[in-house]
Amino acid sequence: MTQQTQPTKEQVRLYMEARKAQQCPPPSIPEIRRQLGWGLTQLPTSDGRRDGRI
């Protein structure tokens, strides 16, 4: 299973300030997530299930 990590408020503020200074259309959502490092991370596989079913 994966868990999303979120950027800090300060990272988002700095990103938004930099975006205001640019004179081009906004990037796509995946590009914004990539720039902020807001990706998916792997969770440990041990989740406490006994029988392996979901």
Image: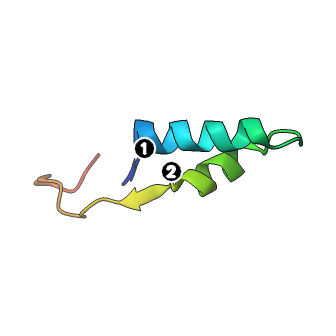
Question: In which quarter of the view is residue 29 placed?
Answer: top right
- Give the alpha-carbon distance from disc 1 to disc 2, as whole Å: 5 Å
- Give 48 or 6, whichever is nearer the viewer: 6
Q: Is residue 8 above or below residue 31?
A: above
- Is disc 1 in contact with disc 2, using a CB cutoff of under 8 Å? yes
Circle 2: is it few (<14), some (14-19), or many (20+) Cα within 10 Å?
Answer: some
Q: Position of residue 44 (x, y in %)?
A: 24, 63
Question: In which quarter of the view is residue 21 placed?
Answer: top right
Q: Secondary structure at mark 1?
A: loop
Q: Position of residue 17 (x, y in %)?
A: 64, 37
- Residue that numbered label 2 is attached to: 38
Horizontal relation, residue 50 to residue 39: left or right: left
- Give 28 or 10, whichever is nearer the viewer: 10
- The residue sitting at 43% across, 40% down in the picture is 10
- The residue sitting at 77% across, 44% down in the picture is 28
- Give 50 or 12, whichever is nearer the viewer: 12
